[in-house]
Image (cartoon, rainbow, N blue to C red):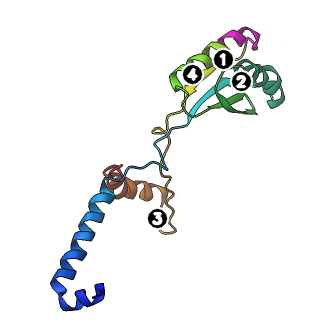
Amino acid sequence: MTLSDIAVRRPVLAAVASLLIIIFGVASLRDLPVRELPDVDNSVVTVTTTYRGAAPEVIDTDITEAVEGAVASIAGIRTISSESRQGRSRVTIEFETGVDIDVAANDVRDAVGRVRGALPDEAEEPQVVKSDADASPVMRLAITSDRMTTAEITDYIDRFIADRLATVAG
């Protein structure tokens, strides 16, 4: 006697067996751990220095290179990237997975503090900021209209959209 013969002769048994398999599958799926996509936040520290009125070339040679050289010797760095533009230098340091972001930020502060005397006197104090994955926006929304003015769009967003987005879980 094959499985199909039993299912045809005893349909209630087949239905109960199918329901048990479905219930067991749902219960197992709920308790299944996530191992392939662990909860990992990137450890990123950014050093921003403002030097008002300075050209990008001056920013690059006087500030960005000094900060990059100072932080390059810190252990656990994956990548260092920088951006020099009119009046501002930004050096972004990404650390390997598993590096404590608080320890890394303190190491970066110490390294930047050692080269502070070599930076131009007119440059502001370098700002060392830890990257927080929860602080970055999850969604960006742009709303345009051919029939509404900017004030009407703003009012519409305040009355109808902002509250609904604020109550979304997650």
Given the image, on which type of amino acid does mark 2 rest?
A: Arg
Pick out the residue farthest to the front: 1
Q: Which residues are magenta?
A: 113-121
Asked if the residues shown at circle 1 and circle 2 are in contact, with their CB atoms under 8 angstroms apart, the answer is yes
The label on residue 124 is 1
Where does label 3 land, which residue? Answer: 148
> Could you say where residue 87 lies in the image, as x and y percent from the top left?
73, 28
Given residues 62 and 65, the one toward you in this image is 65
Element under disc 3? loop
Element under disc 1? loop
Where does label 2 land, which residue? Answer: 52
> Could you say where residue 45 lies in the image, as x and y percent from the top left?
59, 28
Where does label 4 land, which residue? Answer: 105
121 sits left or right of 47 in the view: right
| Residue at horizontal 72 percent and vertical 18 percent from the top | 70
Q: Neighbour class for label 2 at 10 Å: few (<14), some, many (≥20)?
A: few
Given the image, on which type of amino acid does mark 1 rest?
A: Glu
Give the CA separation, mark 2 to mark 3.
Answer: 39 Å
Given residues 135 and 154, the one toward you in this image is 135
Element under disc 2? loop
Asked if residue 117 is among those painted magenta in the image, a careful observer would answer yes
Q: Neighbour class for label 3 at 10 Å: few (<14), some, many (≥20)?
A: few
Quarter of the image that includes the N terminus: bottom left
Q: Is residue 4 above or below residue 81?
A: below
